[in-house]
Amino acid sequence: MGEAAKRQHKRRALASVFSAVLAATLGACGGAAGSGGGSGGGAVTGGMGGHPPATGSGGVSGRSGGSVGTGSGGTGSGGSAAGASGGAGGRAGTGGAGWGGTTGGESGGGASGHASGGAAGHGGGAGGKTGGAGGVLGTGGDHGSGGAAGGVAGTGGGGGGSSACGAGDSKLPPEPTIPAACATVAATQAVAANGVPAETALDTAAIQTALNGCEAGKAVKLAASGSNNALVSGPLTIPSGVTLWVDAGVTLFATRDPGVWGSASAFISVKGAKSGVVGDGVIDGQGGEVNIGGTQSWWDQNAGSSGNSPALIEVRGATNFTLYRITLHNAPKFHVKMGAAGFVAWGVTIKAPSKATNSAGTALTYSNAHNTDGIDPGEAASDGFIVCSKISTGDDHLAIKGSSSTGVTNLVIAHNRFGAGHGMSIGSEFTGGVSGIDVYDLSIDGQGMGTSGGSSNGIRIKSDSSRGGLVDKVTYTDVCARNVSNPILLTPNYSSSTGSDIPQYTHIAIRDFHWVTGGSNKPTVTLDGYDASHLNDVTLDNVVIDGVASSDVKASYTHVTLGPGAVNFMPSGTGVTVENDVAGSSTPNPCTGKWTTF
């Protein structure tokens, strides 16, 4: 079996396993207000769409769901995604945002996993999320049969339907769902838009007590109460198996009092298995606000020598972590430090700064939101998915950091939209290596962001000999960039620090990449290797940089393969060799539908 086939086989098997984990721990259920069905489905052994296991068994009988959801809210969805289950796309709920029981017959796929039930599953219209009808025979599997009836929608439930982003993508696991609530903690104060909460009394004890008392597989829900829409807390720890759910219309603020933080390295710390942070609400780290008892914000400190500010969310030594639909604003430093073996980040929105000024009237910009990386898969992060998310921030959008002995392996980064930021980055530290990274359907839009130079990057791999290593088998496909200064930047000279950990980038492929004209930034392409003994290996296939001049392209110690799609520049420089496999003309990526508003 070739290397590509092995990676595909591993990813398929992984996605199937993760599908089972999600179904068991985050499956839709009746909800907080009243219980809907149990799991409503059989075992998830038939494989998710496009990623079946080698063999699979039919679904066992699903338990019945609850009665029809009575909540209010946005559009709900019906059965699970096409190919993910044997259940039929569910019957529409009559209420709003209540999540129904899970679709019956989760495993109807059998060996191929492509059961016909549950196509896109959007049954609800303006009604609530609907339970699957279940019991429909899966036609895709060789051995599987559909599960028994899964029941109609449960009452109460986990809020809102899901978007179509990622639907039908066979590389992805099923979209996560929000688990039932074990407890609800009500908001304690009303905070106006762009305001700051009072800190005379914190909600730390109430939230942490609820988290500690929650049973595995359920969530603590933070909910609005009358006009109250906010809670403020010190550092929190999410126990193994428990999810923190911030409901729509609610903001959880991190305290601005450094004395409350103590030695905590993050506002929300996660360890253990099958935990999550979910919901349509906001978690705000208040990184741009002046700290209580001081004259500086966390961001001010990051710009100086005392920049050891805490992260907003830190996932360390965890397995099968889920980050779903949550909005993260203004982290003191990194928004998400992701050290998990098996994770899904889906539908996440990250923005720093989220407002034009702080409460003292000081202007907040992307340039002074120092070190506010979006999501950083680091240490031993592996086997993860970052999907359908929007990130606009003051530092790296994503930064993959393989600083452990095992490095970072096997990530899928798909259908994401980036605004301001320092790039879809790898580095700067990866002494343990980075490999098996698949990035596709990405846009990086610097239009109107006020950033330039080293703060305005597209694809970036960065390191130096004090903290480098091997980056291998990284593919970028269908990428569009606009008004960023460095559309493609591969450098082994990120800083002047030196050592024996030499950075080298091999089997790097960039395909269907288009930097389009717009804005004032002039594009520079950099393809630099370390030396003749550590040559980089880069393939450029249908890569077009509008308006690029030969003086805008810098390269050294790199073997470059061009084609088969056309490339509108020719790398050259010390130690550069070019293998031209371009086969005639090609159409540049049109970038249709790639731009969004932040």
Image (cartoon, grey):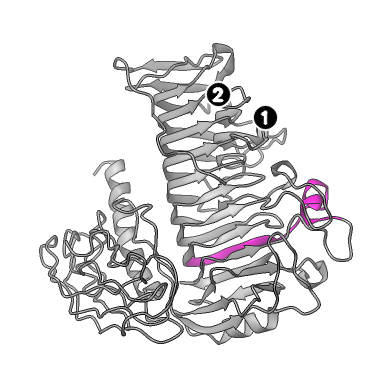
Task: Give the residue at x 42% y 78%.
Answer: 71
Taking 19 as reference, is 211 above or below it?
A: below
Which residue is most to the top? 550
Answer whether residue 409 is visible to the viewer in this image: yes
The amino acid type, in three-letter code, at marker 1 is: Gly
Q: Nearer the viewer, residue 420 or 72?
A: 72
User: Quick check: is 86 in the magenta stretch?
Assistant: no
Q: Quadrant of the N terminus?
A: top left
Residue 553: horizontal and vertical position, in percent?
55, 18
- The span shown in magenta is 296-319
410 sits to left or right of 139: right
The answer to whether the residues at label 1 and label 2 have Cβ atoms under 8 Å apart is no
The tag on residue 525 is: 2
Percent position (x, y) of residue 86?
19, 67
* Image-based side of 574 in relation to 138, left or right: right
Q: Earlier in the sequence, mark 1 or mark 2?
A: 1
In this orientation, which residue lies closer to the viewer: 197 or 41? 197
Reading the image, the residue beneath label 1 is: 453
328 up-or-down from 546: above or below:
below
